[in-house]
Amino acid sequence: MNTQDQHGRGRTGPRPRRARLLAATGAAALVLASGLATPAASAAPQARAAQGAQAQAAAKAQKDDKSGGKVLTVAVAQSVDSLSPFLAVKLVSTSINRLMYEYLTNYDPKDAHAIPGLATKWEASPDKLTWTYTIRNTKWSDGQPVTAEDAAWTFNKMMTDEGAATANGSFVGNFEKVTAPSPTQLVIKLKKPQATMTALDVPIVPKHVWEKVTDFSKFNNDKSFPIVGDGPFVLTDYKADSYVRLKANKDFWRGAPKFDELVFRYYKDQDAAVAALRKGEVSFVAGSPSLTPAQAASLKSDKNIHVNEGPGRRFYALATNPGAQAKNGTKFGDGDPSLLDERVRHALFMAVDRKAIVDKVFQGHAVEGQGYIPPRFSTYFWKPSSGQELAYDPAKAGQLLDEAGYKKNSDGKRVGKDGKPLNYRVLCHATDPNDKAVGKYLQEWWAKLGIGITLDCLDNVTDPWLAGKYDLAFDGWSVNPDPDFVLSIHTCDARPQTPKDTGATDNFICDKAYDDLYAKQLAEYDPAKRADLVKQMESRLYDLGYMNVMAYPNAVEAYRTDQIKSITTMPSSAGNIYGQDGYWSWWSAVPADSGDSSDGSSSTGVVIGIVAGVVVLVGLAVLFTVRRRATAEDRE
């Protein structure tokens, strides 16, 4: 729910093993955090206690810090799943990867077109089956040169090691051979054309460090610091479920960041994070991943705090369990069999008032959901025709349930042929106020249909989701400029090989017609033709009724204007700060007391905190329990 996010998934980018980005959400994931129509602006007593403990921890960290440099502190609502770029899927983790390692290409912050990254240029053969990249002359943070061999080794390891393919393996599934004829030349030969060759969202790692790893499925890259990288920041310290600390890479080829250190501090309670912003303990708050309308409104009255809001790159959805099944044909989980009937799925979604969700839950800080890709990505944005749309129509929903054989009994309950009333378990994130708020509306709307629901709100949704032990679940992903990843997670091949494994699948969807369209769009280089194929995929996914996109939440964030002079949003004209497709925000940030002037690409939409030192969070529980099977990732 990433990415991709991403990246968000968000994480972003395809892979054969995946996790869920839905903290919201995060990317994966991950949506505006809001209350019901009347959300509380103040923290609960336990939240206030947590705020006090965090304030004490912040004071201690500031006292203990000896660096004397400028520290940018970012409050985040996700804990890190892994610091290994081969395993990380959560939005916070993939965002940190972007700061640690260069990718072959990057995305321009103005309009997200492909620009040089580790590769200074690239060209394809006439048949588009051979791609040659020229690798930049730069160094790893330990002084060793970065070469094409590092990139070739990274891709080859993903092609040959199932554990290394966990997070991004789908990118290399079509690779036939990867070589490095010289230190500055990388050559990738494909089995068939692949349209994502300028959007390979894969962190390139140093071979001389990573070739020592014996088990990529278990190595989390969190025991030895500093971690060798070539990005704008070098990771120097980490404490699980607490903080990640990075220092500026003074030798970064684009130029060194203007902040000496960057700290991501984890808050399970969003009110506590907002309180820390007011006190100056942090300078940026992203939310879960966004601020609630009440929080945003309350912060706007502070003269030293600016609230940034822009079109989001996420969608917020409700997903059904289509019957969990592995690629070897083994069925598992306990999803309600009634959901295998398309009429039932359509009926449920026709009883969801999307406009009410936008107005009452997001309070206008979102756009009503339609297709799978948010309107921010206009090239691929799709919406159903009037005759195709599953519009809010409770009466029609009732008719569909009658046709499917689920009629009301004398008590007004929908029952099946076995006489048992329909009662669905809805998996939700305990940390996301949106899930709970929308869940209450679902209870009301579906009760009128004669259907009961039980909200199963957990800190860790990973285990039941991987096991297929849910009926419906709140879902969400950060979408990349190239939509391949969020499309790939619904292919048959994304499912786990066996029930004991973890696949790249979002919720076990497998449809041959969808798979055929996916293969066609991946091989189509003509932008207009590919966009049309992507829209056909969205249409097919919509008609199947397994995914109900309810809203596209705005990115709502806040920062202290007395600590930050300028920072780049993405898009730079009006966009988000946290969870970008790139490292532009944190790399470009200028401290408020700096003499540097911002350039034209900067905007007033980012927040940076000058809090000295890393703060160890006190009294906070783990947001998501990390769980891995042999070659598994965890979902969020």
Image (cartoon, rainbow, N blue to C red):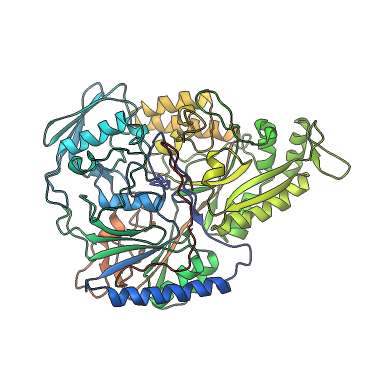
Image-based side of 185 in relation to 480, left or right: left
Q: Judge from the rendering whether residue 129 lies leftward or rightward of residue 347; answer left or right.
A: left
- Where is residue 189 drawn, in percent x and y? 24, 25
Residue 110 appears in the figure: no
Q: Is residue 631 above or below residue 449?
A: above
Please tell me in which quadrant of the rendered image residue 281 appears.
Answer: bottom left
Vertical arrangement, residue 319 with respect to residue 130, above or below: below
Q: Number of numbered discs present? A: 0
Q: Residue at x 57, y 59 (%)?
A: 433
74 vs 352: above or below: below
Between residue 515 and residue 464, name the one nearer to us: 464
- Spot the residue most to the right: 410
Q: Is residue 399 visible?
A: yes
Q: From the viewer's side, name the closer residue of 331 and 500.
A: 500
Q: Residue 366: give x, y in percent of width and height.
A: 52, 55
Kindly indicate the quadrant of the structure image that contains residue 67: bottom left
Residue 141: x %, y % from top left: 17, 52
**Relative side of 621 to 114, left or right:** right
User: Residue 416: horizontal and vertical position, in percent?
Assistant: 78, 34
Residue at left 30%, top 72%?
610
Residue pictured at 16% horizontal, 59% vertical: 250
